């Protein structure tokens, strides 16, 4: 089956945004890679090209490359196409900063709170980041997060004083 | 002078046939509560009813896993109930953590924080298994052995020590005051203290 | 004898009691987890009399950290873990995870397995809508319809038990197909009889609940959302269809056997609570009609699982590197999963997007301003909020 509709969408967007790279993955899935400074311009452009909703902001921690990849999942009801918009930012907590997009898509406020709580990415311009979200205060102060260098099993052992049979430095303690 | 101890068997019979449940759906197992309460596995014929106020309830069903945030509210609700009160734990999560045995946000051994009378195995237990547990609870009440509330009162230091180690000191005041700065509108006038 | 406020404050201070600062004439109410209407989810309300002035959502009571736990378990063990995310319809997280892993593996799922997966998903939708009807009727005070809905749901639970072995947590849909075959023609006949039975009882529900004067009075004109607000705030599912947007994932991004089925997508314009209730009522009919069509088609012959020699050593099952996104129309909205793999025997990142993350946090905070206390549980119920989706 032809992928004409998706190729048209990719071509129209790439004409107006020369700094981006885009391709068609399969029927109804397209992908863009953009540099981190241009995220606001690109999302404003997507909003004008009929991508009405943002589904989620996913943060993936690539510890070997030293970067965090932010994937913005955008869905369009008019074209019926799902777009992945991927950027990469450095991994250290002081340098992981991105401008917030909550005035373009208001629902992004909730997604940014989620990514901040679990991956410690700071979104500039979002005042609700200090508000308590899901984790309790004592967990937040102890540094609980979903990054790859957080040692979950030793934290559980310290907190609940149980599970002494399992060793923390083995990767495969399940099998 | 009336000696109430002569009437113990009658009082125990009345207590076991009219347990009221606190309406608090604490976890996964809450989805098997409506089949129990409605017409197929009806438990209202035993006198059991859900009641919204903890001051008028005596049975607490902990249906499934418990997170520390929920455990704070469970302890506050449990202490609001009048004596005698009973606790029924569903599933394998309150016993040893269940599927979330290595998770940072699921309590592994609930008996350290709250006294449990009857535990029901399964993940999740069928309504027939829960009825079995309720009947065992009724047996314990009849013979006078359901004494979780007595254990809580006598060993209060043990339970309090475990709770404070998990949550930190002074957790009740901190929980009550946590949202006040976010609710207040700083532009309007504030009533002076 | 009337005592003035200043005297009370002075007396309290002399006795050592501390007063908390609040604004004039408003008070704070914890609409908390111990409540018959919210399912372990809490709202902090600021009230003036009986009208809500400000609302803050307080999730986090059911957080178990699925996204981190899934990185430590092999690919097939994750099915038993991830399906505990959405409790009223537990087949949906299984289906999206399996569809995403199928896309990464690149194999073709046999047709019999696709037919069985569609039937299981539709049965899950019908049971979830009946569970929602029971919740709605208990909150409005019309208890008879709730008892009926729970009883009819039990018939479907018995069918699930014969097919998969458990009433609630099925662990049935796996990457590559389904785990077991249908237990014979008798099961198909029982399913057909059950669908026919529930369809004939829908006019009774209309008489008591959906065309009742009480329901209309309590729900009309409350919690209004218009089309622009709904699209900007990321609302999906029946709530969006009640605001005037014709959107259904089964039509826009078809999966499984939906391209061959004929069904309507109900859309209403008003966007208030009554429209959200009526959209769900029309969808129960459409789901029963889909089940009738599937039963008439009959299951195609063939294997029910992909035949692959790697299944003999499941803990060492490796998936090629890449990423995939799959989404499915659940009764609460648009449920999606994003799976990233780097070629090992465990996933690198699994993210589940529950539909209540958009309408449980921002939408409810804005819809509740100006509502009365008695309307708060009703608005929460008509939005179809499922707290484990937010907390994961």
Image (cartoon, coloured by chain):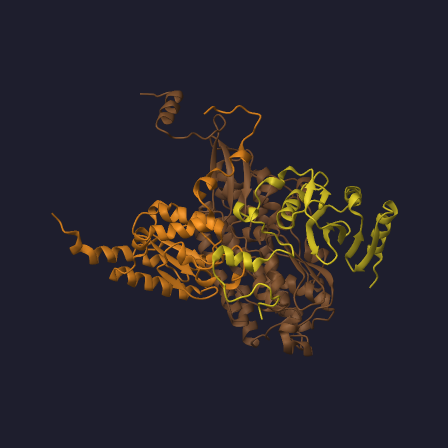
Instruction: Give the residue at x 20% y 58%.
Output: B9
Which chain is represented by brown in the image? C
Q: Is residue B115 visible?
A: yes
C239 or B140: nearer the viewer: B140
Question: In the figure, what tint was chain A given?
Answer: yellow
Number of numbered tags placed on the structure image: 0
Query: Which quadrant of the figure has residue C343?
Result: bottom right
* Quadrant housing the N terminus of chain A: bottom right
Q: Position of residue C278 (x, y in %)?
A: 58, 48
B104 or C374: nearer the viewer: B104
Instruction: Give the residue at x 20% y 56%.
Output: B8
Q: Position of residue C167 (x, y in %)?
A: 50, 66
Q: Is residue A108 left or right of residue C368?
A: right
Q: In the displayed structure, would residue C84 be above or below residue B69?
A: below
Q: Is residue A66 left or right of residue B19?
A: right
Q: Is residue A67 left or right of residue C53?
A: right
Q: Is residue C281 visible?
A: no
Q: Is residue C385 left or right of residue B117?
A: right
A135 or A25: nearer the viewer: A135
A162 or C365: nearer the viewer: A162
Q: Position of residue A136 (x, y in %)?
A: 53, 47
Which chain is represented by orange in the image? B
The extreme left residue here reads: B1
């Amino acid at each position: 089956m032809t992928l004409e509709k998706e190729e048209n969408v990719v071509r129209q967007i790439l004409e107006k945004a020369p700094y981006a790279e885009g391709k068609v993955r399969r029927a109804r899935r397209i992908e863009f890679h953009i540099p981190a400074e241009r995220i606001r311009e690109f999302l404003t452009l997507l909003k004008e090209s009929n991508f009405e909703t943002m589904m989620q902001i996913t943060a993936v921690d690539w510890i070997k490359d030293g970067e965090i990849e932010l994937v913005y999942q955008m869905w369009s009801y008019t074209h019926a196409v799902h777009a992945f918009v991927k950027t990469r930012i450095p991994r250290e907590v002081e340098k992981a900063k991105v401008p917030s997009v909550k005035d373009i898509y208001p629902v992004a406020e909730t997604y940014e709170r989620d990514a901040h709580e679990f991956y410690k990415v700071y979104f500039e311009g979002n005042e609700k980041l200090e508000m308590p979200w899901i984790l309790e205060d004592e967990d937040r102060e102890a540094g609980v997060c979903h990054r790859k260098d957080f040692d979950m099993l030793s934290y559980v052992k310290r907190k609940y004083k149980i599970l002494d049979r399992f060793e923390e430095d083995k990767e495969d303690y399940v099998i | 002078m009336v000696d109430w101890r002569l009437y113990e068997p009658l009082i125990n019979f009345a207590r076991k046939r009219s347990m009221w449940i606190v309406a608090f759906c604490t976890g996964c197992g809450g989805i098997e509560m409506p089949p129990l309460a409605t017409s197929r596995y009806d438990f209202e014929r035993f006198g059991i009813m859900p009641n919204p106020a903890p001051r008028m309830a005596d049975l607490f069903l902990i249906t499934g896993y418990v997170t520390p945030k929920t455990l704070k509210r469970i302890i506050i609700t449990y202490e609001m109930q009048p004596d005698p009160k009973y606790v029924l734990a569903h599933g394998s999560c309150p016993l040893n953590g269940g599927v979330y045995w290595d998770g940072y946000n699921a309590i592994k051994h609930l008996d350290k924080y709250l006294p449990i009378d009857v535990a029901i195995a399964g993940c999740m237990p069928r309504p027939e298994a829960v009825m079995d547990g309720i009947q065992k609870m009724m047996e314990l009440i009849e013979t006078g052995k359901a004494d979780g509330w007595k254990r809580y009162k006598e060993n209060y230091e043990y339970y309090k020590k475990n709770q404070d180690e998990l949550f930190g000191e002074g957790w009740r005041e901190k929980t009550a005051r946590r949202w006040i700065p976010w609710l207040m509108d700083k532009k309007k006038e504030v009533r002076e203290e | 004898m009337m005592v003035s406020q200043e005297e009370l404050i002075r007396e309290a201070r002399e006795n050592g009691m501390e007063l908390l600062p609040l604004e004039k004439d408003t008070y704070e109410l914890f609409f908390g987890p111990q409540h018959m209407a919210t399912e372990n989810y809490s709202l902090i309300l600021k009230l003036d009399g009986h009208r809500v002035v400000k609302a803050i959502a307080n999730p986090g009571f059911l957080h178990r950290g699925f996204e981190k736990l899934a990185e430590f378990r092999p690919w097939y063990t994750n099915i038993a873990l991830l399906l505990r995310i959405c409790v009223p319809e537990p087949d949906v997280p299984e289906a999206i995870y399996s569809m995403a892993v199928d896309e990464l593996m690149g194999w073709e799922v046999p047709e019999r397995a696709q037919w069985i997966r569609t039937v299981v998903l539709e049965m899950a939708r019908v049971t979830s809508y009946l569970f929602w009807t029971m919740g709605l009727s208990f909150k409005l005070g019309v208890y008879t319809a709730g008892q009926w809905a729970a009883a009819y749901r039990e018939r479907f639970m018995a069918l699930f038990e014969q097919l998969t072995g458990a009433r609630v947590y099925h662990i049935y849909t796996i990457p590559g197909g389904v785990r077991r075959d249908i237990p014979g023609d008798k099961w198909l006949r029982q399913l057909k009889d059950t669908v026919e039975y529930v369809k004939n009882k829908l006019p009774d529900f209309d008489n008591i609940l959906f065309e009742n004067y009480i329901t209309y009075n309590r729900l009309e004109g409350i919690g209004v959302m218009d089309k622009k607000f709904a699209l900007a705030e990321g609302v999906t599912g029946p709530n969006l269809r009640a605001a005037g947007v014709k959107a259904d994932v089964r039509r826009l991004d078809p999966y499984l056997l939906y391209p061959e089925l004929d069904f309507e997508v109900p859309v209403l314009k008003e966007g208030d609570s009554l429209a959200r209730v009526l959209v769900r009522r029309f969808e129960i009919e459409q789901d029963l009609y889909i089940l009738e069509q599937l039963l008439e088609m009959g299951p195609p012959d063939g294997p029910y699982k992909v035949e692959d020699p790697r299944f003999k050593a499941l803990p060492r099952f490796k998936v090629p590197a890449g990423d995939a996104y799959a989404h499915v129309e659940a009764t609460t909205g648009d449920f999606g999963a994003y799976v990233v793999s780097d070629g090992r025997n465990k996933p690198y990142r699994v993210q589940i997007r529950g539909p209540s993350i958009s309408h449980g946090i921002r939408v409810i905070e804005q819809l509740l301003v100006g509502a009365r206390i008695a309307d708060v549980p009703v608005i929460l119920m008509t939005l179809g909020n499922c707290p484990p989706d937010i907390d994961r």
